[in-house]
Image: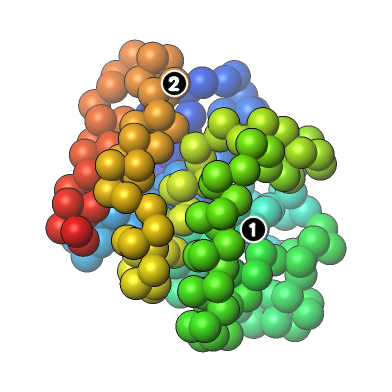
Amino acid sequence: MIKGIYGELISETSEAPGCYGDSCAETSRYYILKWPDADKSTLSIFITNTFFIRHPESPWREDDFSTDQALPFFLATCSAKMYHQLKANHWRLPNGHFISPVFYAILTNRKWLINLCVFAQTLIFKLPWRWDDGKKKFTKNTNTSDYLNFYHIAYPMSKWARKLVSKEKMISAIESYYESELQASKDKELTLEIINLYKREIEVIW
Protein backbone atom coordinates (compact mmCIF):
# COMPACT_ATOMS: atom_id res chain seq x y z
CA MET A 1 0.00 0.00 0.00
CA ILE A 2 1.34 3.43 -0.94
CA LYS A 3 0.07 7.02 -0.84
CA GLY A 4 -0.65 8.66 -4.17
CA ILE A 5 -0.15 12.25 -5.23
CA TYR A 6 -3.52 13.26 -3.73
CA GLY A 7 -2.78 11.66 -0.36
CA GLU A 8 -4.99 8.67 -1.20
CA LEU A 9 -4.09 5.04 -0.55
CA ILE A 10 -3.31 2.90 -3.59
CA SER A 11 -2.94 -0.86 -3.71
CA GLU A 12 0.29 -2.29 -5.09
CA THR A 13 -1.08 -5.72 -5.95
CA SER A 14 -2.23 -4.77 -9.47
CA GLU A 15 -1.40 -2.37 -12.28
CA ALA A 16 -3.35 0.83 -13.01
CA PRO A 17 -6.27 1.28 -13.17
CA GLY A 18 -7.02 -1.86 -11.14
CA CYS A 19 -4.93 -0.60 -8.26
CA TYR A 20 -7.33 2.37 -7.94
CA GLY A 21 -10.40 0.19 -7.36
CA ASP A 22 -10.40 0.25 -3.57
CA SER A 23 -8.75 3.64 -3.03
CA CYS A 24 -11.82 5.35 -1.58
CA ALA A 25 -12.59 2.49 0.80
CA GLU A 26 -8.96 1.97 1.88
CA THR A 27 -8.37 5.69 2.40
CA SER A 28 -11.63 6.11 4.32
CA ARG A 29 -10.90 3.17 6.62
CA TYR A 30 -7.38 4.47 7.21
CA TYR A 31 -8.67 7.85 8.33
CA ILE A 32 -11.25 6.23 10.61
CA LEU A 33 -8.40 4.35 12.30
CA LYS A 34 -6.41 7.58 12.59
CA TRP A 35 -9.35 9.40 14.21
CA PRO A 36 -9.41 11.86 15.93
CA ASP A 37 -5.97 13.11 14.90
CA ALA A 38 -6.27 12.81 11.14
CA ASP A 39 -7.19 15.65 8.82
CA LYS A 40 -9.92 14.14 6.62
CA SER A 41 -9.80 16.85 3.97
CA THR A 42 -8.01 14.35 1.71
CA LEU A 43 -11.30 12.46 1.37
CA SER A 44 -12.79 15.35 -0.62
CA ILE A 45 -10.88 14.06 -3.66
CA PHE A 46 -13.49 11.29 -3.97
CA ILE A 47 -16.39 13.75 -4.36
CA THR A 48 -17.55 14.97 -7.77
CA ASN A 49 -20.38 17.28 -8.79
CA THR A 50 -22.46 14.24 -9.71
CA PHE A 51 -21.67 11.67 -7.01
CA PHE A 52 -18.60 9.92 -5.59
CA ILE A 53 -15.75 8.00 -7.23
CA ARG A 54 -13.28 5.26 -6.33
CA HIS A 55 -10.26 7.40 -7.24
CA PRO A 56 -9.70 10.88 -8.75
CA GLU A 57 -8.33 9.21 -11.90
CA SER A 58 -10.90 6.41 -11.94
CA PRO A 59 -11.84 5.40 -15.50
CA TRP A 60 -15.07 3.87 -14.15
CA ARG A 61 -16.42 7.14 -12.75
CA GLU A 62 -19.53 7.51 -10.58
CA ASP A 63 -21.57 4.61 -11.95
CA ASP A 64 -19.02 2.12 -10.63
CA PHE A 65 -19.05 3.42 -7.05
CA SER A 66 -20.18 0.52 -4.88
CA THR A 67 -21.69 0.01 -1.45
CA ASP A 68 -18.32 -1.30 -0.25
CA GLN A 69 -16.82 2.07 -1.20
CA ALA A 70 -19.70 4.22 0.01
CA LEU A 71 -20.03 2.69 3.46
CA PRO A 72 -16.52 3.40 4.82
CA PHE A 73 -16.57 6.84 3.19
CA PHE A 74 -19.80 7.71 5.01
CA LEU A 75 -18.49 6.30 8.30
CA ALA A 76 -15.38 8.49 7.95
CA THR A 77 -17.17 11.69 6.94
CA CYS A 78 -20.89 11.42 7.86
CA SER A 79 -21.39 13.05 4.45
CA ALA A 80 -24.72 14.87 4.32
CA LYS A 81 -24.37 15.06 0.53
CA MET A 82 -24.15 11.28 0.24
CA TYR A 83 -27.10 10.78 2.59
CA HIS A 84 -29.38 13.16 0.70
CA GLN A 85 -28.37 11.84 -2.73
CA LEU A 86 -29.00 8.24 -1.72
CA LYS A 87 -32.31 9.09 -0.07
CA ALA A 88 -33.47 11.07 -3.12
CA ASN A 89 -32.54 8.08 -5.29
CA HIS A 90 -34.62 5.71 -3.12
CA TRP A 91 -31.48 4.30 -1.46
CA ARG A 92 -29.91 3.32 -4.76
CA LEU A 93 -26.45 4.05 -6.13
CA PRO A 94 -26.16 5.82 -9.52
CA ASN A 95 -25.79 2.41 -11.20
CA GLY A 96 -29.23 1.44 -9.90
CA HIS A 97 -28.02 -1.02 -7.27
CA PHE A 98 -29.56 -0.79 -3.84
CA ILE A 99 -27.20 -0.01 -0.99
CA SER A 100 -26.57 -2.86 1.45
CA PRO A 101 -29.07 -3.47 4.28
CA VAL A 102 -26.53 -2.53 6.94
CA PHE A 103 -25.68 0.73 5.16
CA TYR A 104 -29.40 1.55 5.01
CA ALA A 105 -29.66 0.74 8.73
CA ILE A 106 -26.81 3.13 9.54
CA LEU A 107 -28.21 5.93 7.38
CA THR A 108 -31.65 5.60 8.98
CA ASN A 109 -30.36 4.88 12.51
CA ARG A 110 -32.12 1.52 12.88
CA LYS A 111 -30.06 -0.15 15.59
CA TRP A 112 -32.11 -3.35 15.57
CA LEU A 113 -31.37 -3.77 11.85
CA ILE A 114 -27.66 -3.10 12.40
CA ASN A 115 -27.61 -5.91 14.98
CA LEU A 116 -29.53 -8.22 12.64
CA CYS A 117 -27.09 -7.50 9.79
CA VAL A 118 -24.12 -8.12 12.08
CA PHE A 119 -25.56 -11.48 13.07
CA ALA A 120 -26.30 -12.38 9.44
CA GLN A 121 -22.76 -11.45 8.36
CA THR A 122 -21.21 -13.72 10.98
CA LEU A 123 -23.24 -16.60 9.52
CA ILE A 124 -22.12 -15.66 6.00
CA PHE A 125 -18.49 -15.79 7.16
CA LYS A 126 -19.02 -19.47 7.96
CA LEU A 127 -20.36 -20.34 4.50
CA PRO A 128 -18.05 -21.83 1.86
CA TRP A 129 -19.40 -19.41 -0.80
CA ARG A 130 -19.92 -15.66 -1.02
CA TRP A 131 -21.53 -13.31 -3.55
CA ASP A 132 -18.93 -11.41 -5.61
CA ASP A 133 -20.32 -8.03 -6.72
CA GLY A 134 -17.65 -7.61 -9.37
CA LYS A 135 -18.09 -11.04 -10.96
CA LYS A 136 -21.86 -11.11 -10.33
CA LYS A 137 -21.73 -14.70 -9.10
CA PHE A 138 -20.94 -16.82 -6.06
CA THR A 139 -17.26 -17.51 -5.43
CA LYS A 140 -15.34 -19.42 -2.75
CA ASN A 141 -15.48 -17.59 0.55
CA THR A 142 -11.75 -17.00 0.92
CA ASN A 143 -11.81 -13.20 0.63
CA THR A 144 -11.09 -11.59 4.01
CA SER A 145 -11.87 -8.05 2.77
CA ASP A 146 -15.42 -8.44 4.10
CA TYR A 147 -13.97 -8.36 7.61
CA LEU A 148 -12.68 -4.81 7.15
CA ASN A 149 -16.06 -3.12 6.72
CA PHE A 150 -17.51 -5.55 9.26
CA TYR A 151 -15.01 -4.29 11.82
CA HIS A 152 -15.86 -0.63 11.21
CA ILE A 153 -19.60 -1.32 11.39
CA ALA A 154 -19.89 -3.97 14.02
CA TYR A 155 -17.51 -3.11 16.80
CA PRO A 156 -18.55 0.53 17.33
CA MET A 157 -22.26 -0.12 16.76
CA SER A 158 -23.14 -3.62 17.93
CA LYS A 159 -22.35 -5.43 21.18
CA TRP A 160 -23.03 -8.71 19.41
CA ALA A 161 -19.92 -8.46 17.27
CA ARG A 162 -17.41 -9.05 20.06
CA LYS A 163 -19.32 -12.19 21.09
CA LEU A 164 -19.80 -13.58 17.59
CA VAL A 165 -16.32 -12.98 16.12
CA SER A 166 -13.29 -13.47 18.33
CA LYS A 167 -10.44 -11.01 18.65
CA GLU A 168 -8.06 -13.62 17.28
CA LYS A 169 -10.22 -14.27 14.21
CA MET A 170 -10.52 -10.57 13.41
CA ILE A 171 -6.78 -9.96 13.70
CA SER A 172 -6.06 -13.05 11.60
CA ALA A 173 -8.46 -11.88 8.86
CA ILE A 174 -6.93 -8.40 8.76
CA GLU A 175 -3.39 -9.80 8.54
CA SER A 176 -4.49 -12.20 5.82
CA TYR A 177 -6.09 -9.39 3.79
CA TYR A 178 -2.95 -7.22 3.88
CA GLU A 179 -0.51 -10.10 3.36
CA SER A 180 -0.52 -9.67 -0.42
CA GLU A 181 0.09 -5.93 0.01
CA LEU A 182 3.12 -6.63 2.19
CA GLN A 183 4.50 -9.02 -0.40
CA ALA A 184 3.95 -6.59 -3.28
CA SER A 185 5.06 -3.41 -1.53
CA LYS A 186 8.46 -1.87 -2.02
CA ASP A 187 7.84 0.22 1.10
CA LYS A 188 6.04 -1.86 3.71
CA GLU A 189 5.85 0.89 6.33
CA LEU A 190 2.35 2.16 5.49
CA THR A 191 0.82 -1.31 5.26
CA LEU A 192 2.37 -2.30 8.60
CA GLU A 193 1.04 0.93 10.11
CA ILE A 194 -2.49 0.04 9.00
CA ILE A 195 -2.25 -3.49 10.40
CA ASN A 196 -0.92 -2.17 13.71
CA LEU A 197 -3.68 0.45 13.90
CA TYR A 198 -6.28 -2.31 13.60
CA LYS A 199 -4.50 -4.43 16.20
CA ARG A 200 -4.26 -1.52 18.63
CA GLU A 201 -7.96 -0.70 18.31
CA ILE A 202 -9.03 -4.33 18.63
CA GLU A 203 -6.94 -4.75 21.78
CA VAL A 204 -8.59 -1.66 23.29
CA ILE A 205 -12.10 -2.81 22.37
CA TRP A 206 -11.66 -6.17 24.07
Residue at the spot 50% in from the left edge and 65% down from the top edge: 118
Evaluate whether residue 46 shows in this view.
Answer: no
Q: Is residue 17 above or below residue 137?
A: above
User: Residue 183, located in which quarter of the rendered image?
Assistant: top left
Q: Nearer the viewer, residue 125 or 108?
A: 125
Q: Is residue 200 above or below residue 9?
A: below
Left or right: 52, with 63 as reference point: left
Q: Amino acid at mark 2?
A: Ser
User: Residue 81, located in which quarter of the rendered image?
Assistant: bottom right
Disc 2: CA contacts within 10 A as few (<14), some (14-19) or many (>=20): some
**Which image quarter is the N terminus in?**
top left
Q: Which residue is mark 2?
A: 180
Q: Which residue is mark 1?
A: 67
| Pointer 1 with pointer 2, Cβ within 8 A | no
Residue at the spot 51% in from the left edge and 21% down from the top edge: 13
* Residue 96 in picture, x, y percent from top left: 84, 63
Q: Nearer the viewer, residue 174 or 182?
A: 174
Residue at the spot 69% in from the left edge and 66% down from the top edge: 99
Q: Is residue 130 above or below residue 100?
A: above
Q: Nearer the viewer, residue 97 or 131?
A: 131
Evaluate whether residue 147 shows in this view.
Answer: yes
Residue at the spot 72% in from the left edge and 44% down from the top edge: 131
Q: SS for tag 2?
A: helix
**Which image quarter is the C terminus in?**
bottom left
Q: Amino acid at mark 1?
A: Thr
Q: SS for tag 1?
A: helix
Left or right: 157, with 93 as reference point: left
